[in-house]
Amino acid sequence: MGGVEDETEPSRKRIRLSHEVLRDLANGLSIVGSNPDFSGDLMARSLPIKGDEEIVGSKGIIKRVEFVRIITQALYSLGYENSGARLQEESGVSLQSSVVNLLIQQVLNGKWNESLATLKSIGLLDESIIKSASFLILEQKYFELLDDDKVMDALKTLRMEITPLSINNARVREISWSILFPVKFVHFDSSNFSTTRAKSRAKLLAELQKLLPPHVMIPDRRLEHLVEQALILQRDTCMFHNSEDNVMSLYKDHQCGRDQIPSRTLQVLEAHNDEVWFLQFSHDGKCLASASNDRTTIIWEVDSHGDLSVKHKLSGHQKPVSSMSWSPDDSQILTCGVEENVRRWDASSGECLHVYEKAGYGFVSCAWFPDGKSMCLGVNDKSICMWDLEGKELQCWKGQRILKISDLQVMNEGKQIISTCRESSILLLDVEAKVERLIEEDQAITSFSLSRDNRFLLVNLLNQEIHLWNIEGEVKLVAKYKGHKRTCFLIRSCFGGLEEAFIASGSEDSQVYIWHRGSGELIQALPGHSGVVNCVAWNPANSHMLASASDDHTIRIWGLNDLKMKHKGPANHCNGVHYCNRKTDRGETWL
């Protein structure tokens, strides 16, 4: 095998790989020496010295050699091979050492024994890494011998080289079957053997890159990863980031203004004739459902311009409607009267499909199981029941499972049910494992809301606080939100905005409150309602649309300050809708 050159040799004498090989390698595996074909004057700036290490940057924390190496890698990743080679020549800093370059060339050429020897000469201190890397190389050798019909040589490699490594025994047993059943382990296309094999060897290099320490082989696309990390950190710490545009500029630090937060009333929906208690957008954001003390539920349709209009007014309950739930596909909706029956409606036609009743009892809450074929219903005897769509009770969890006024959620593909089981406790019931966990608060719980990813629970408390709990794994309190007013009424809050980065809540002072979820800082307090704001809902498909429901009998639709709505027709009130950017009959303009 060829010798390994001294690490101190000038870069122009180090192993070089062809540009064709570079293009076949995964980005970040571009290993070259210098390119001697450059000419012309160069401009360079001397770098400050800090101790024995050259440092760049005003903070004194970036090592020059590492910085140059990842820039070189980025140049090759972008296809600028000549520039990458020129940078190595000018800086005297190679992307990889001559030993690593030699290893890569040997792997690409299929010189397995030589590559194993070179691997051991790199100077790795962790024996387990050497063994794991050797295993990958020998596995490739084994399969290529089989593809060349050299079965006995492959068997010898398996017995004499792979097995003595004494690692990954399950994989050893798996690949040993390829001798008996070769069809299942075909790696190469016989019609294009050499090309396909080369790609397979490049894949092997990618696996070695992940395994070897980063100072030996730089992780793939390292500079891109660092820049993305910086941008994401800026975005995540931006108090007002609520834009769907994922492209961010590298030319300046990212900072959004308050204009990204819905803060202007765009519409006032006035079709209810009593207090509006509950709101919920459909999963696709194309409809909003509202429940009222007037014993009706209204389905509002959101058009392509973001305007809402009455689609159906659902009547039939004999008591106020306290809660509702959209089916997983948004084709149906459940409505629940206060300790009354539950009704299932066709969301498209407005037809009542079924009325669910339990003799001697009333329902207090409702939710769908993810399959859309069954429901979870809270009963006023404090039990929780599972019913099918035809009205058959499939299962019932009795005991102190739910309060008379309680939210109810089903999560994790129907495996868990969440409910308020006691005044200051929330029950997390694992239906399959039959395990119960509790979230214990030291104040009375009034309502809760589940995040879309089922990882967080937002809990409203009697003491005018909202608590954010992480319920994935061990239950943990992660944030608190304060500022809204709540003394005696049931107030609901919600997650919302881009990636649910915000928390919104109603309040007894007639305002809507919005906090930044990560920092807990209060961003906005939105006036407009003339009564208690009972519930808020953020459109899951439009991060700039927020709805609020109030005792003043109205629903307000909030949007961006600079959004100019366009409506046809001279009337201010149309189908229960008041457009707030229109002139009133008295010539006043609503803002």
Image (tube, grey):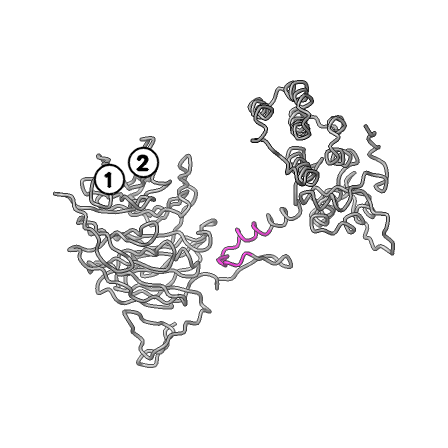
Question: The C terminus lies in which quarter of the figure?
Answer: bottom left
**Residue pictured at 36% horizontal, 48% vertical:** 466
Asked which quadrant contains residue 470, the reply is top left
Q: Judge left or right: residue 91 versus residue 365.
A: right
**Residue pictured at 82% horizontal, 53% vertical:** 44
Q: Which residues are magenta?
A: 231-246
Q: Is residue 553 magenta?
A: no
Q: Is residue 233 magenta?
A: yes
Residue 201: x and y in percent read 68, 36
Which label belongs to residue 429?
Answer: 2
For the residue pair 290 and 5, the one nearer the viewer reads as 5
Asked which quadrant contains residue 557, the reply is bottom left
Question: The N terminus lies in which quarter of the figure?
Answer: top right
Residue type at tag 2: Leu
Mark 1 crowd level (few <14, some 14–19, many ≥20, 10 Å Cα): many
Asked if the residue at tag 1 contacts the one at tag 2, i.e. Cβ–Cβ closer than 8 Å, the answer is yes
Q: Up-down: is 15 above or below 45?
A: above
For the residue pair 47 and 546, the one nearer the viewer reads as 546
In primary-sequence order, the first of circles 2 and 1 is: 1
Q: CA distance from mark 2 to mark 1?
A: 11 Å
Farthest residue in the front direction?
A: 191
- As helix, strand or loop, the secondary structure at mark 1 comes to strand
Mark 2 crowd level (few <14, some 14–19, many ≥20, 10 Å Cα): many
- As helix, strand or loop, the secondary structure at mark 2 comes to strand
For the residue pair 515 and 65, the one nearer the viewer reads as 65
Residue beneath disc 1: 384
Asked which quadrant contains residue 285, the reply is bottom left
Q: Judge left or right: residue 454 versus residue 199.
A: left
Residue 373: x and y in percent read 29, 45
For the residue pair 499 and 374, the one nearer the viewer reads as 374
Residue type at tag 1: Ile
